[in-house]
């Protein structure tokens, strides 16, 4: 719709490129990736006719995109296809509408059932395109679309840290052109609002340090045995991620082969190490309440008829008994909790009308933090969590997740404590302060969290790091991977930059 979207030159330039090339567009959050998609969709419909398809990972994102397109694409019919629409109705809507917005799971299911085909589709837009990896539904859809010769537009803030990952995303989407602009690019610098990003170190209390020492000893015991058996590298204590990777390779050796007691013993040790490593991370970065909850889970698993042998061995160990004694006398809350309260209180006091978002990796911590923030004067708090139920708490349906964000936008609430469900895509009302309760090693997730603020006005991001714990390598890994991502993007762009325009599109430009 004319006059309803600000004209930004870089968006127009990128949209022109995306019309002629299948392209992966990488832009910071809030810089108008959806606007670029809108421009390309409108151009394709106007000049080529046919149908366009926009895919997004979740139903709330699908509905958000559909509302935007219905408002901005004048004279075009827009259909929303999700699992809540009956299959026979989806088939009719597919035929009837020029623009279809859908989750990928619905499209791949309907393709396989023969309810729809992609022959009339001229453009497919993959939102959060970094998901086009492995068995995710984006991959077979792009493969099916490849034979039509239509255009592909992938949009993301962060395609991944390595050159191999970026190329894999592009290969899976059948894309051979990348357009990427970072926060310091001259084209978008005037549209970027300052984000003050700071790291606050947190000391590990003596009570938790003693718990940590016991867990580290139990973890090191498993690792030493694995090292002596020749299943993991020697030299230092490897992190849990490395143990998980070796666990996968060991499991692969058991499929279709003869049972080997030596291998199965190693698998048991690895399972114990993974559980103990997780317990250590909970203790050091979340506090003893989170650890106590996890210990209850280990006990329950150990007592079950088909209980995990790893849990049985951990629960029967002297170290576990020592942990029970230590946890009983330790304070439940991590020192991060009062610090979050202080940060939120100061923000709401100094900036009336402010909005705050706190990210945490764990549902238990989400509950603890939201409960404590409810005690802050002026804080109107709500949680944003995933759909899966937990032992003592049901999840939030997608409709409830959207409602939480709507309440934040309207000002009914001003503070949201979110798990990873709040990281991706959804409009979260431009919080003035974003707090990482702990750093995440993934550059994709870190960029998405940080991108929640600074959209329409300056913002602030704070990362809480418990000293001498897994928080420190997580932060270092995230920052390192983000720098690697920028270099890798540039390298791949340079490799692919010299390709000629397709003949028919060159003629259109002439």
Image (cartoon, helix red, strand yellow):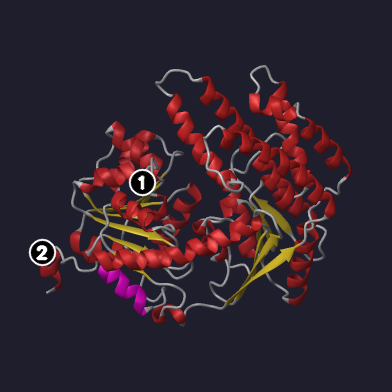
Check the image and report above or below for 311 versus 77.
above
Where's residue 320, x and y in %?
77, 33
**Can residue 174 be seen at all in this image of the molecule?**
yes
Where's residue 327, x and y in %?
83, 41
Question: Which residue matches tag 1?
Answer: 138
First in sequence: mark 1 vs mark 2: 1
Where's residue 294, x and y in %?
72, 37
Q: Which residues are magenta?
A: 9-17
Farthest residue, direction right: 329
Instruction: Please tell me which residue lies in front, 89 or 434.
Output: 434
Question: Which residue matches tag 2?
Answer: 503
Quick one: quadrant of the C terminus? bottom left
Check the image and report above or below for 142 versus 410.
above
Where's residue 476, x and y in %?
57, 62
**Can residue 127 be seen at all in this image of the molecule?**
no
Q: Secondary structure at mark 1?
A: helix
Q: In the displayed structure, does residue 345 sit left or right of residue 266?
A: right
């Amino acid at each position: 719709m004319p006059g309803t979207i600000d004209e930004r030159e870089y968006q127009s330039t990128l949209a022109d490129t995306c019309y002629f090339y299948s392209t992966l567009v990488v832009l910071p959050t809030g810089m108008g990736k959806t606007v670029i998609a809108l421009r390309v969709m409108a151009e394709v419909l106007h000049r080529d006719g046919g149908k366009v398809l926009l895919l997004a990972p979740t139903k709330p994102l699908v509905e958000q995109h559909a509302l935007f397109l219905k408002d901005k694409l004048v004279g075009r019919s827009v259909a929303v296809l999700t699992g809540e629409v009956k299959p026979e109705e989806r088939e009719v809507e597919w035929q009837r509408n020029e623009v279809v917005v859908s989750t990928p799971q619905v499209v791949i299911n309907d393709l396989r059932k023969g309810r729809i085909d992609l022959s009339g589709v001229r453009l497919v837009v993959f939102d959060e395109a970094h998901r086009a990896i492995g068995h995710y539904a984006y991959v077979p859809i792009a493969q099916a679309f490849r034979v039509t010769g239509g255009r592909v537009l992938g949009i993301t803030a962060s395609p991944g840290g390595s050159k191999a990952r970026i190329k894999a995303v592009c290969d899976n989407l059948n894309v051979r052109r990348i357009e990427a602009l970072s926060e310091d690019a001259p084209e978008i610098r005037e549209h970027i609002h300052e984000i003050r990003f700071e790291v606050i170190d947190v000391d590990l209390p003596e009570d938790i340090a003693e718990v940590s020492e016991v867990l580290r000893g139990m973890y090191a015991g498993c690792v030493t045995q694995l090292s002596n058996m020749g299943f993991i590298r020697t030299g230092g204590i490897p992190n849990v991620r490395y143990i998980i990777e070796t666990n996968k390779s060991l499991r692969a050796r058991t499929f279709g082969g003869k049972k080997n007691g030596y291998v199965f013993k190693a698998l048991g040790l690895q399972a114990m190490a993974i559980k103990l490593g997780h317990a250590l991370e909970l203790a050091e970065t979340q506090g003893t309440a989170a650890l106590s909850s996890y210990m209850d889970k280990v006990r329950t698993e150990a007592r079950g008829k088909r209980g995990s042998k790893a849990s049985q061995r951990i629960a029967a160990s002297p170290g576990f008994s020592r942990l029970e004694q230590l946890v009983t006398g330790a304070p439940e809350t991590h020192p991060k909790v009062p610090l979050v309260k202080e940060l939120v209180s100061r923000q709401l006091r100094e900036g009336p009308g402010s909005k705050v978002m706190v990210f945490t990796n764990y549902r238990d911590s989400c509950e603890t933090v939201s409960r404590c923030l409810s005690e802050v004067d002026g804080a109107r708090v709500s949680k944003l969590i995933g759909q899966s139920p937990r032992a003592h708490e049901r999840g939030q349906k997608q409709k409830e997740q959207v409602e939480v964000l709507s309440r934040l936008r309207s000002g009914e609430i001003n503070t949201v404590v979110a798990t990873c469900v709040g990281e991706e895509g959804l409009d979260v009302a431009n919080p003035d302060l974003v707090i990482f309760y702990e750093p995440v090693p993934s550059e994709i997730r870190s960029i998405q969290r940080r991108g929640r603020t600074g959209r329409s006005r300056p913002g602030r991001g704070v990362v809480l790091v418990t000293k001498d714990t897994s928080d420190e390598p997580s932060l270092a890994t995230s920052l390192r991977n983000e720098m690697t991502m920028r270099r890798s993007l540039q390298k791949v762009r340079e490799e692919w930059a010299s390709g000629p325009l397709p003949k028919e599109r060159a003629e259109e430009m002439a």
